[in-house]
Each structure stands twice: as structure tokens, then as C-alpha cells.
Amino acid sequence: MAERKAYLDLGNGQPPIELPIYSGTLGPDVVDIRGLGKHGVFTYDPGFMSTGSCNSGITYIDGDQGVLLYRGYPIEQLAEQADFIEVCYLLQYGELPTLEQKQDFDHIIRTHAMVHDQINYFFRGFRRDAHPMAVMVGVVGALSAFYQDSANVSDPRHREISAHRLLSKVPTIAAMSYKYNMGQPFSYPQNRLGYAANFLHMMFSTPCEAYEPNPVLVKALDRILILHADHEQNASTSTVRLAGSSGANPFACIAAGIASLWGPAHGGANEAVLKMLEEIGDVSNIPQFIARAKDKSNPFRLMGFGHRVYKNFDPRAKLMRQTCHEVLNELGMHDDRLFSIALELERIALEDPYFIEKKLYPNVDFYSGIILRAMGVPVNMFTAIFAISRTVGWISQWTEMVSDAEQKIGRPRQLYLGPQRRDFRPIGER
Ligand code: SDX
């Protein structure tokens, strides 16, 4: 694969070290540093700002151009013309499905949405006010106790079965965690319903009356799921890959991804955005929050702004803003207070030199929470819905890694800053 070479002179009188340079289909070239260790030196890159951890053919992001491709297809086209189950097939198998392939895949996912009935007992151990993400980390991880029949990660068919089980059951577990919070009975999945409609049914139906999801809200949720499905080697995906590199089972790996996604700097940001908008309370308070975000001595950050890769508009945020308008208009909430604050906050922030200089634009989390809140989803379920969507990205990336002949157990090194070697002193001499 190497086309060119880089030369690293360590300034130690030795000849420069030759490092192959590889070019991908799109995006920046990479310098292969795998041989550096034998020269007694490591690279140093906390947060992996400039490090490629793997090769992948799933998702491509161009942060400067605001481009996001799933298997080469622009996110704008997929959000407009595809549905989530189609995008799941694309991410997992690499190609858009034919009609027959889509129908077969959709049937598999619909008919495996029910969880083992013993799973119900796990919920009884949680307090009723347990955060849904805490429940999901526990219950999704526990799925590995039920599926020993697909535990051989080196068997492609076992991997596919586990992927299908996760895609179909994670929404059910998320909805169960909501019902448990509410003190309502669990709603079983309905095989007659599509993915997004089934989730809304499991969330909002009760035994007391018939429930049919609003088709506008179903389409909005389906789009939210498409927009959050995968995003290259983000923190939670890298967590899944690192966990999977040891040979851990996919259920445990996805549980690790859910744990990482929960952080407010990552998928937890959509929940944090709503809390921030509520705290702002009125457009007249926006300047003071902008000032706090710019104050280096203040840890406050404008939630929903900034991104490690996007130094232009996050293409998902633009699509999410459009969906926001559609949902609020459908629900007669077009003058929604928080949406008005969000629009004004975006306008002011994008004119502020600090945000312009640091290229801080709204990201995918900035508008998603407003849509979900308008749909009646409680704030503590926002990241759980992000996790439902990202499960297909995680499991596709996990599958790609496990089947990559190049993959090895992930084991980074370090720059050691601790004490020199010293001898133990008995407690009486300390
Ligand atoms: C997601 O990686 C992915 O792909 C993630 C994701 C996905 O789909 O998987 O896109 C989903 O996680 C989106 C991001 C959601 N998080 C938030 O909205 C939380 C708020 N944003 C920030 O915490 C921050 O922008 C990050 C974490 C998203 C990115 O942080 P980086 O890349 O490590 O950048 P940084 O922290 O080094 O910030 C660069 C500068 C700093 O100032 P200086 O030290 O250079 O003076 O920009 C400032 C930061 O202080 N800055 C902000 C800011 N974000 C960065 N200042 C105010 N408000 C912000 N939101």
C-alpha cells in the first residue's frame, strides 16, 4: 500500500527512520509508525488528535467541508431518500439493499425485538429513578449471558446473529428502561410496526387504550436514527473497537460503547443542551452564557457546539434543524420557547469572534434534544435514543475490526512521568 515515505530524524546521530506513507480512497494520508517502537521511541498523542487507529471502509468525514458519507453515500441523500433499516443494512453489509434484501432484513429485525422474559427481572433490581443509560449499560451487557449460541466471534454467522440481536433488542431495552422509570408496564414490541414506529409504540403505548404513532413523528425519529448511526472512530466507537480487540463478546463491547457515549462531551451532550437551554431560560440571558463559554477560567462550555473533526457546520445539525421545524410545526409548537432560544443562540454564537476563530459550529446534538422533547421524550432518554441509533455503527465497526486480518489487541504505550526506581521502606521508617 505504501506509495511514499516519511523520514524521522531522532537527532541521535542515527540514520533517519523510514516510515511508509499510505493514501486512502478519500481524506488525509497516514504515516505508518508501527515500526517506531523497535527504535526505542513512541509517538505521543493524548486524545488521538492526529492518530489513525485503524483502516475502515464504513464512514468518511471531511471536517473542513462538512461532509459525512456512509459507505460512500452522502448523509443528506440518505436522510432524504432512505429509511433507518435501509441504512442499517448499508452500514452492516456495505451496499444498499435490493427490495427483497431489505424485506428479508427488516423481517429479521422486527421478529427478534422481544427480549428473553428473564430480562424483565433485571429491571426490578434498579431504583425507579435509575438513569436509562445506567440501565442500558447493565442490561445490554447482560445479553451475553443469554446468547452463548452465538458467542464464537471468529464465526461470521455468529457475528451476524449477534448483530441482528443487538439491532432488534436495544430499542426494546431502552423503551423498557423508560417504562420502568415511569412505573408503567412494559409494552411488548409489535412485529407489524417498522423500527421507529415500534420504538414509539414501546415507549408510549399503555394497556389502557389503543396507540398509533404519529407518522410525522415516526419519520422524524427515523431521520434522527439515520443521522446518528455512525461517525467514524469517535470515542464510543473506539471504545467498542478496543474492547472487541481482546476478543470480548459483542454484547459486552456494545455495553462499553453505551458507557462511553453517556459522557456529556459525547452523546450525553443532547441531554446537556436541553438543560443548558432551560438554564438560559430567555434569549436576553444568552450573552452571559456566551461570555461564560469564552471565559478560560470557567469550565462551562456551550453544549451542542464544537466538534473534534467538524471545523465547519456538522451536516447532521443542518438536517436536524430542518427536522426540528417540521416537528414543531406539526405539533403546533413553532414558537416553542427553547427552539427560539436555540435559534438565537446559534445566530449570536456564529457571529462571535471567539466561536468563529475556534470554528465552533452547532453539532448533531444541538437540535436533536429539542425534537425529542417536543415528541414527549424525557431528557434522560435522549442519549439512550442516540445509543439505539449508534448500535448499528458500533456493531458494523466491530464486525469490520474482528474480520480484519491486520487487527491485533489494542495496547497503547505511554510517556512515563512517575518516580524513578526506589526501594520499599518499612512503615516504621516513613
Ligand atoms: C458528539 O467524535 C464524534 O464524532 C462525536 C459525535 C458522534 O457522532 O459520535 O459527533 C457526537 O459527541 C458531538 C459533540 C457533542 N459534545 C458537545 O456538544 C459538548 C461541547 N463540545 C465540547 O466539549 C468540544 O467541542 C468537543 C468535546 C466536542 C470537542 O473537543 P476537542 O476537539 O477536544 O476540542 P478542544 O476541547 O481542544 O477545544 C478547542 C478549543 C478550546 O479552547 P482553547 O483551549 O484552544 O483556548 O475550543 C474551545 C476549547 O475551550 N471549545 C469550546 C467549546 N468546544 C471547544 N468553547 C466553548 N464551548 C464549546 N462547546
Image (cartoon, rainbow, N blue to C red):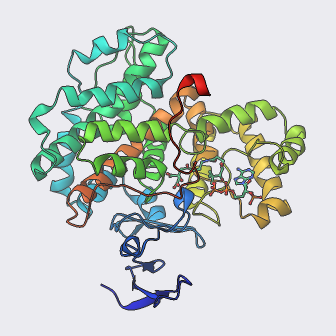
Farthest front residue in view? 429
Q: Nearer the viewer, residue 220 or 245?
A: 245
Q: Nearer the viewer, residue 25 or 375?
A: 25
In this view of the protein, can residue 212 be seen by the observer?
no
Q: Nearer the viewer, residue 421 or 228?
A: 421
Residue 239 pos. (x, y %)? 41, 47
Q: Is residue 52 left or right of residue 91?
A: right
Residue 65 pos. (x, y %)? 58, 73
Give the image quarter of residue 189. Answer: top left
Where 384 sits versus 295, above or below?
Answer: above
The residue shown at (71%, 64%) is 359
Residue 123 pos. (x, y %)? 36, 14
Where 297 sits versus 120, above or below?
Answer: below
Residue 416 pos. (x, y %)? 54, 55
Q: The N terminus is located in which quarter?
A: bottom left
Q: Is residue 363 left or right of residue 75?
A: right
